[in-house]
Amino acid sequence: MEYKFEKAIHGTIGNEKYTCTMQWRNGTFIADEPKKSGGKDRGPDPYTLLLSSLASCTLITLRMYIDRKEWDIKEITVNANMYQETRNEELVTIIDRDIRTEDKITEEQRKRLVEIARACPISRLLEGKTEVRTFIYDEGQEAKQLYYGNGEISVKWKPELCRHAARCVGQLPQVFNSKAKPWVDAHAATTQQIIEQVGRCPSGALGIRYDNLQVKPGIE
């Protein structure tokens, strides 16, 4: 199992309704609720972000395909909207995606572009089977800490926070082996490899303690 991102999307909210600060690999942006929902409308709301994801993925996928085919289509636009209705006592979400270009295209091109749009990664995600796993952590869970060292660093493990061990096992199995005791062998890879892998931990269950001052600190 390998996550899509090395560093998880990170969101924070305080007491202010309902401003969220979202951190991604290249900066931050604000998400909020509209004023009618009690927010200040200072950023896109969650539904807008969802539809923006679909629209941008559609545009990027289509542009890649058009460029590869060398078709003379200069600009594409996407309008995305959604509504919900109840069918047989089940809530169903319908997303409408309208694609438009000012350039003239053939009927064959039109059909192919619809197929490509439906195959964009976010379309496939929305129309496929998606599971959302939820874990919650608090400071009281961090009492127990175990250390596994190699003379230069020690891998700090907080077992109560660990929910994603399969990631470490899959990406650096010579160090992290859930079937072994102890499950961390800090001698089985280079110090730098271990530091990099620990840095990918999404839950904070893993950290690094520097036991040799000649090793440049990078993650703590």
Image (cartoon, rainbow, N blue to C red):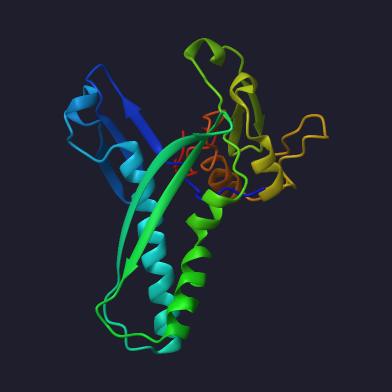
x and y percent of residue 192 in the render? 56, 50
State whether residue 25 appears in this view. Answer: no
Number of numbered discs: 0
Which residue is rendered at x = 56% and y = 27% of the image?
134
x and y percent of residue 71 in the render? 38, 88
Which residue is rendered at x = 40% and y = 36% of the image?
10
x and y percent of residue 209 in the render? 53, 31
The picture quadrant where one finds residue 96 is bottom left
Which residue is rendered at x = 49% and y = 15% of the image?
138
Q: Nearer the viewer, residue 119 or 20?
A: 119
x and y percent of residue 4 in the render? 53, 51
Q: Nearer the viewer, residue 3 or 115?
A: 115
Which residue is rendered at x = 83% and y = 35% of the image?
179
Q: Nearer the viewer, residue 86 or 217?
A: 86
Q: Nearer the viewer, residue 18 or 144?
A: 18
State whether residue 175 appears in this view. Answer: yes
6 lies left or right of 64: right
196 lies left or right of 180: left
148 lies left or right of 21: right
Q: Eyeballing the image, is 116 above or below 66?
A: above
